[in-house]
Image (tube, rainbow, N blue to C red):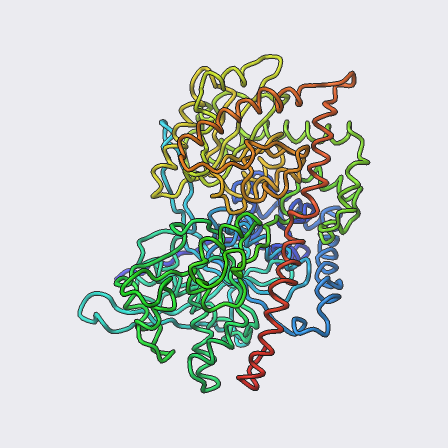
Amino acid sequence: MMTLHRYEVRPRVPAELAPLVPLAKNLWWSWNERARELFARIDPELYERVSENPIAMLYRAPQERLDALAKDPAYLADLARAQDELRAYLGRQTWFERTAAGTPLGSARVAYFSMEFGLHESVPVYSGGLGVLAGDHLKSASDLGLPLVGVGIAFSQGYFRQSLDHEGWQTERYPPNDWHDLPVSAVSDAAGKRVAVEVTLPVLTGPDQGKTRSVALEAWRVDVGRVPLYLLDANIPQNAPEDRALTNTLYGGDKNHRIRQEILLGIGGVRLLAAIGHTPTICHMNEGHSAFLALERVRQMMREHGVPFVVAAEASSAGNVFTTHTPVPAGNDGFSADLIAPYLRVLGEGLGLTADEVLRLGKVDPSESGGEFSMPVLAIRLADRYNGVSVLHGREARAMWRVLWPDVAEHEVPIGSITNGVHLGTWVGRDLTALYDRVFGAEWVERGDDPSLWARIADVPDAEIWRLRQEARARLVRELPERVRALTERKGLVFDPGKVAGPLDPQALTIGFARRFATYKRGTLLLRDAERLRRILAREDRPVQLVFAGKAHPQDWGGKELIRDIVRASRLDAFRGRIVFIEDYDMSVARALVTGVDVWLNTPRRPLEASGTSGMKAALNGALHASVLDGWWAEAYAGDNGFAIGHGEEYADAEYGDRVEAQALYRLLEEEIVPLFYDRDADGLPRGWIGRMKRSIAGVGPFFNTTRMVEEYTKKLYAPAAARCRATRGDSLAGARC
């Protein structure tokens, strides 16, 4: 029998450039422009082709180019500066060290569990906003010095890559992730052996039906500044093929597949942390996907201290925190009692519970027969603190989950809110980063929650900030065709200029809309009256152009139809060169859009947008947000720092609401947005627009960032959880670690 071996010839990294390897394996470079430039300078075209993955860049760069850089004094000096900058970042005193010393939190450890993490496009284990928020949470935890680790899944294919056919219909591709080719490291013990843990799953079919099987998990470590992220991997040789597939795709497969993935994340994640000696004090469940971790924490406490379930559940729940992101019950993971029963039998064995007793932990009404097992309900029942992700979403979450506190008035339901934010170092573009460095000071990212710092934007000359915005828009317009070309060539196809639908205008008012294409987000609201839209876009003296991007879930046919409608519109003569859809939306496309557009458009049906963060990113780059008063914008809008569509109405009749708000959006464009943008003074400056930009930056900057957000999680959730954890375990479990 013939055995095939795979060999890959890689260049030798010269000794002088050896520091590039550890630098590449800490994603600190992803929010440090000078570090990214070091890798881009090796081979700019290759860097773009490998999705700015520095490890893949080093493995594929021409040997002669590496040898040349090893003799380049300027490059070596820049490399030394980047090393010094990273060392200084890792070594300086942090906010957490200054504020938590001597408190229960000071000796605590936090583990942040999420199904997806959006850190950078080169580590494709994210789908959209939830993952990017999780990635930004880790980055700010690093900036602030929190003793936090992340836990997720090392998807072998990740989320899908999007392609659009000639009619604009979305198709999905799942290219493999080679974890040996990414900026990660294998999790190994002191002897260099891969650390492995196991989870137990039921056998559902075949001769062994009713028995159990073990699934082995290894892990990869991603260093995010000071914070390690551990990604669990079932795609290893000792597992059966069907089990290796459990970590293949994000949000793929049927409901059985989803249950197994969530067991791997929650149960396997807690076991991995124990195996590497990192037992957490606090576990933060980012959405309900990881709720099974609460059962594993109870099981470990029962085993270690010989206490019954009720005692261990009370003690371990004191250290659990749950964040919900979904404002409607249908958006939360739930499984029928019959489907999940075999899994609950296995989970109950280590807890001394029957499957029915475990089922009741996840049911809204434990007394009813049958019913659905809800992951958020399990998380709420076995956590001590809970929050929504905006003030408005907190209201919706209290209304939705009041059923779990039937004797409490709705406003007293103990679900608070911590409004989302974005990581400043990641999302502010290079031009404004340089401006903020100069005006705010070198440590403005770590001090991002200081309003007095952001107020200094008022002192920046109008001409300077407008020039930066003009340059950012021109760069976006210039790079869009090249972005489409590069994507096409990566797929091995011939570039079709028609996919860009005509050249854009670097001077025109540019409106961006980019997000997950769920139907409630109403991506085609602007297309309801095509003739009126044509008149708005086509004026030669006041041209307007629209740039769209986003993906629909593979099973969301309604979302796919919205994308198709936009692509079709972009190819009509009336809109050619005025509407563009950029396919394969990822973090790279997002950065280009939020830094380059003039207006960020958001059109959800209120109150279905839990928070939203894309508009925050655009606002921090000087774009003006135009949105329904939903999610974060209901808090941020001050009347003169952006634009509001409507007045916060909520419509029982969705079709009627769509019709009313489409008309409101057209009027907003015709009467406010377009005139304000093109109202120029003798110096050619739109003073009114620039004033609104500055008020937006000054208002959005100090609050809607993850520096403030993570500090708020620390003060409102982590610190009280650590204190209660210590008190609870001191009463009932003497000697239990907190």
Please indicate whether residue 248 sits to the left or right of residue 283 in the image. left
Q: Looking at the picture, how far across and down is residue 133, in whole percent?
A: 55, 51
**Residue at image coords 42%, 72%:** 295
Using the rendered image of the protein, determine whether residue 69 is visible from the camera's viewpoint: no
Front position in the image: 131 or 272 = 131
| Count of all numbered marks drawn on residues in the image | 0
Using the rendered image of the protein, determine whether residue 427 is visible from the camera's viewpoint: yes
Q: Looking at the picture, how far across and down is residue 275, in whole percent?
A: 49, 75
Which residue is the extreme one toward the left?
Answer: 207
120 shown above or below 435: below
Please indicate whether residue 603 sits to the left or right of residue 204 in the image. right
The quarter holding residue 433 reads: top right
Which residue is the extreme one toward the top?
Answer: 540
The quarter holding residue 728 reads: bottom right
288 shown above or below 302: above
Name the image quarter holding the N terminus. Answer: bottom left
**Residue at image coords 55%, 49%:** 120
Name the image quarter holding the C terminus. Answer: bottom right
Front position in the image: 232 or 318 = 318
Please indicate whether residue 633 sits to the left or right of residue 195 in the image. right
Front position in the image: 690 or 324 = 324
**Residue at image coords 43%, 21%:** 571
Front position in the image: 385 or 63 = 385
Q: Looking at the picture, how far across and down is residue 354, in whole percent?
A: 31, 76
389 shown above or below 505: below
Q: Looking at the picture, how far across and down is residue 123, in whole percent?
A: 51, 52
